[in-house]
Image: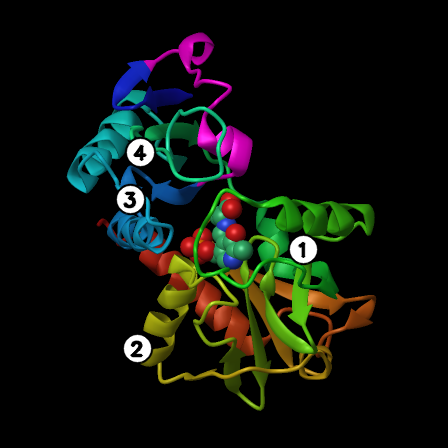
Amino acid sequence: MVIYLNGQRVDYENAKVSVEDRGFQFGDGIYEVVRVYEGRFFYLNRHLERLKNGAREIYLDLDFGIDTLEKTCRQAVKESGFDNASVYIQVTRGTAPRKHVFPEKSSCNWVVIVKEEKGIPDEAYKNGVMAITIPDERWSRCNIKTIQLLANCIAKQKAKKANVYEAIFYRGDIITEASSSNVFAVKYNVIFTHPANNFILNGVTRRVIFDIASENDLEICEERFRLKDLMEADEVFITGTTTQVLPIVKIDGKLIGDGVPGKITCSIIEEFNKLTKSVDC
Ligand code: PDD
């Protein structure tokens, strides 16, 4: 593992922040997870852009340059020697006495952590995985990738308890996303996914699916759909940086389509895998 804390390489034992870090006390911070395939970053530029936008949304002044962060990420991956890695970036509002109001003077605490990434076993992509559905109990600013992930953690724990891979959220009866991934449903060859508004995180991988759809003449529709539509879909898949494109073949114990990864899902996986071999930005 390679760790940079506030721009300095530190070993694990010295990678420490104060107990008064606002991330620790208030969840007052944002993060990104970025994949590296065979030494190439997979859309680091889009992740950094989202981080910048998230910082603006929560009135967090990034007191270091985004270019410094980018350089640090690249340097850390190089030093790690890992060909396939995940890079965790976290920025908090810094260290200050515990008061809800923002500190007048504080500097960000920011970390870059590089770990080797082995990925999810191939058979999950070949056979698909299962999911449950649960009410979306998160706040209504899910477009910001904040480190406040308690509702997501509870959801993932419920999935684990149910012996399935993921928990899919519904708000009212509208499918939003999942605990750590975006959700797509295919019906009559049209791919549906929740619009990129305040109720979902606009995933970098989600946007790659739009790129793939437009290059391959697949019809994709950013439209809300209901729990009932999800259960009656021909195909369902989820996307995320570590998840990639993963077919869901059973939800709440009910088979989706034929209970095997569908045609459109498989073609998207194929195109996605090609991109992981070429994208370098
Ligand atoms: N999670 N929605 C949620 C709630 C997420 O937590 C994530 C990613 C996504 C997919 O976003 P992207 O394609 O940009 O990775 C959607 C990360 C990987 C995590 O928390 O580990």
Residue 5 drawn at (x, y percent): 33, 22
Say which label, 3 or 1, has the lower sequence index: 3
Is the Cβ of the residue at disc 4 closer than 8 Å to that at disc 1?
Answer: no
- Circle 3 residue: 41
Q: Quadrant of residue 178?
A: bottom right
> Residue at point 42% right, 63% down?
202
Q: Residue furthest top?
A: 13
* CA gap, disc 2 and disc 4: 48 Å
- Circle 2 residue: 215
- Circle 4 residue: 104
- Circle 1 residue: 166
The answer to whether residue 226 is left or right of residue 32 is: right
* CA gap, disc 3 and disc 1: 26 Å
Q: Nearer the viewer, residue 270 or 233?
A: 233
Q: Is residue 20 magenta?
A: yes
Up-down relation of residue 22 to residue 140 (above or below)? above
Q: Nearer the viewer, mark 2 or mark 1?
A: 1
Say which label, 2 or 4, has the lower sequence index: 4
Say which label, 4 or 1, has the lower sequence index: 4
Disc 4 element: loop
Examine the rendering and report whether any part of residue 230 can be seen: yes
Q: Quadrant of residue 133?
A: bottom right
